[in-house]
Structures are given as C-alpha cells and as structure tokens.
Amino acid sequence: MVRTVKDTPPTELLRCPVAPAGLPAEGEAAIPPAWRAAIVRLAKSRAEVADQLSRLIAWHDRSCGVSSGVAPPG
C-alpha cells in the first residue's frame, strides 16, 4: 500500500517528546490513596501519549529512535 502525504506537518509537530524530570529522590510526602491513584493514572496516560507521538513521528520520518515495527510511508 502506498500512502501519499499531501502536506508536511509543521516542524513543532515533528519534534520528539521529552520526558519530564521525575520527583526528587530525597524528601517525602503523605499522599492520600485516591490522589496517589489519580497521579499514577495521569503519569501512565502521559507516558502512553508520549509513546504514541514518538511512534507517529517515527512512522513519518524515522526519528525519535523508536522502532515500532511499522514501516513509514513510501
């Protein structure tokens, strides 16, 4: 199957996502269980979106160092 891309996406959409810094190793906090569960859900969602974006960019131009197993068009 051949796919023809009519327009090249804007450069800012082709930038690889950068993972944010994690929480500091020192220090502590008391987080209620419901808040902790929500924070974990948000973190997992962010990771899934970043992975999806990296795979889309890799599919488009093979950057981001992602090996999705899906060949880019062309």
Image (cartoon, rainbow, N blue to C red):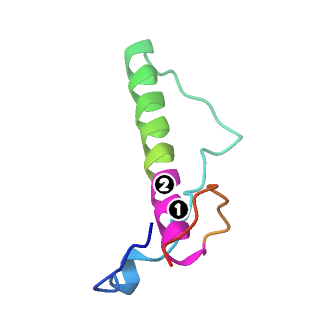
Answer with left or right where residue 12 lies relative to residue 26: left
Marks 2/1: CA distance?
A: 6 Å
The x, y position of residue 57, in whole percent, is 49, 69
- Pointer 2: what residue? 50
Residue 65: within the magenta? no
The x, y position of residue 17, in whole percent, is 51, 65
Q: Please give the name of the residue rendered at 53% of the width and 59% of the height, measured from the top-left corner.
A: 55
Quadrant of the frame with the N terminus: bottom left
Q: Residue furthest left?
A: 6
The x, y position of residue 64, in whole percent, is 61, 70
Q: Type of residue at label 2?
A: Ala
Q: Please give the name of the residue rendered at 35% of the width and 79% of the height, measured from the top-left corner.
A: 4
Number of numbered discs on residues: 2
Answer with left or right where residue 10 lies relative to residue 43: left
Answer with left or right where residue 24 lies relative to residue 51: right
Q: Is residue 18 above or below residue 38?
A: below
Residue 54: within the magenta? yes
Q: Is residue 35 above or below residue 20?
A: above
Q: Nearer the viewer, residue 53 or 23?
A: 53
Q: Please give the name of the residue rendered at 61% of the width and 55% of the height, measured from the top-left corner.
A: 68
Q: Is residue 40 above or below residue 14?
A: above
Q: Are marks 2 and 1 in contact (CB under 8 Å)?
A: yes
Q: Nearer the viewer, residue 71 or 10?
A: 71
Within 10 Å of disc 1 (Cα), the crowding (few <14, some 14-19, many 20+) is many
Q: Residue furthest top?
A: 33
What residue span does the magenta drawing correspond to? 51-63
SS assignment at label 1: helix
Q: Which mark is residue 54?
A: 1
SS assignment at label 2: helix
